[in-house]
Structures are given as structure tokens and as C-alpha cells.
Image (cartoon, rainbow, N blue to C red):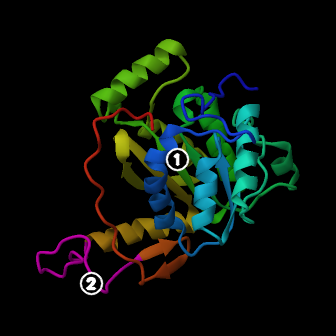
Amino acid sequence: MAEYVVEFGRDGGRVEPDGRLDAPAFHRNHEPLRAALEKHLAGCSGNVVEVGSGTGQHVVYFARHTPDLVWWPSDLNQRHVKSIEAWRVHSGLPNIRSPLRIDLSDPGWCPEMRSGQGPTNLAAVFCANVIHIAPWTVAEGLFAGAGRYLRADGKLFLYGPFKRDGKHTALSNAVFDTSLREGNPDWGVRDIGDVETLARGAGLGLVDTIEMPANNLTLVFARGESLLIWVHAAKAVRSLPPCGGGRGEGWPGKRSIRLRLYGARKSRESPCDTPLPAPSPQGGRE
């Protein structure tokens, strides 16, 4: 097992006889994460790799709500791998594959993907709560692999606590960062600017920053034509009046002028996004 792999599920409920683990954070963040994925992947099909699946609860939940996507979970911790497979079997869902053993310290990720026998030409990569509990080489490997395996309109979703311009977004995140670095000086809450630098090196750009509960963020990266379309779309959306149509309703509303982009495809049927509530005072540990 790679030394940077942190074991999840030890603070949850009892372990099921089949090895399924329960992570308390899943019950707090699965809905906001699904909303972030649906914002960018609704209507998409193809393969999605989850890097660092932990207990396997998230991948089952996401797969249940995205039947056109085939999900490939992964982890290096053997206890996690057993739990992921147990959750997959328990779910009975046809669009979840058995877990891969992806090692982000290897830019090729795993033998199956390097050889082309595993999933490639990915619609998306999803990675939650990994790069702050791992050395920076893991973040480098994440983006190197995403740049290699994402298809032209593919996206990378990166969830966790982040700093902005070198500053923490909440006092609790600063405390959390200190505790991480005291335990391992190679760990710590990462700065969005540093992450963007890695992304550019892999041909990716930041297209969306989504506020999440507990002072976390979901960063969404895309590349090529997909990135350019999102940049122009953001400018176009900012020029539109509120969905309430000037009736004081604000966001959300029922105005028919809607815009959402999925890679190089455009749709005017998507509902306007609802602003998220103010972040909770809890630290970015969800």
C-alpha cells in the first residue's frame, strides 16, 4: 500500500459482514457532489474514473443517478478495495466496474490504463479529498493522468478544501491545514493557483469553482474546445437578466433563456442554477 493512502471508514458505523464500510462524510456531502457533477455531466455518456474511492459509497450513489455513465472506482488500500467491491455487488448496478488500483504517484495510473485495456477516452475524472492528504507528487500525477486519459470534452472534478491566493477561506481550514502539516509536512491544504498551474501543464483550464458545504470547493477543469466554450458561455450568462425576469424573483426562476454547455454541445433547456447557502463554519474535512 502506498504510504500516502489514508484509510476511511474507521470512524463510521459497523463494518458489514461483506466488508462494506460507512464513512460519515458521505452522508453529509453526497448530495452537493451529485449536484456539481450533474451541472456538467447531465446528458453525457461514457466512462468516468473515480480516483481514491474510499469506502465506495459515493461511486454507487453517483452511478445510480447517472445510468448513461460507466463508473470505474479505484483505491490502493486493500480494505477500501474490498468495501468498494462489496458496495458494487450490493448495489446490483450494471454501470459500475470492479475497482482499479490507481496509484497517482505514477503518471500512467495503473497497468490496465497504460496498456489500453482499462478505461480511456474518459468523459470525466472525479477525485474527492485526496490531494491535501498526499504529497504534491500525487497532485502532479492526477493532472498528468487526466491530461492523458480525458477525451476532448472531458472534465476533471476535484473536491476538497483549498486556499485562494495563498489565504485560507475559513479559520477552521487554517487549523485543519496546520494539523495536517504537523502530522506529515508533505500534506496540507493546496492553493487554487498552484493547482491551476498543474492543470495548464496538462492542457486543462479551470472552468468552474463550486462552493460546497463545510468550506470545501469543487473545482472543475476542462480542456481545448470545451474550455473555450465555457469561457465564452460564462461571459454570455453574466450578460443575461436574472431568471426571475425582473419581477424581483431573482435566482432561481422560470425564464426560458437558459444556457448550459456539455463539451462542444449546447443546450437551452437546462434550469438556472440555484445559489448555494453560505458555507458552514465547519472545517474542510467532509
Q: Amino acid at mark 2?
A: Arg
Q: Is residue 5 magenta?
A: no
The local secondary structure at tag 1 comes to strand
The residue sitting at 23% across, 70% down in the picture is 251
Q: Amino acid at mark 1?
A: Leu
Viewer-proximal residue among 95 and 155: 95
Q: Is residue 286 left or right of residue 248?
A: right
- In the picture, residue 282 is in which quadrant? top left
Residue 225 screen position, x and y as percent: 55, 68
Mark seen at residue 158: 1
In whole angstroms, how far apart are the C-alphas of marks 1 and 2? 31 Å
- In the picture, residue 201 is in which quadrant? top right
Quadrant where the N terminus is found in the figure: top right
Q: Is residue 249 magenta?
A: yes
Q: Which residue is mark 2?
A: 255
Q: Is residue 58 left or right of residue 74?
A: left
The residue sitting at 36% across, 29% down in the picture is 173
**52, above or below 116, in the image:** above
Q: Which residues fall within the magenta stretch?
A: 239-259
Can residue 196 be seen from the camera position used here?
no
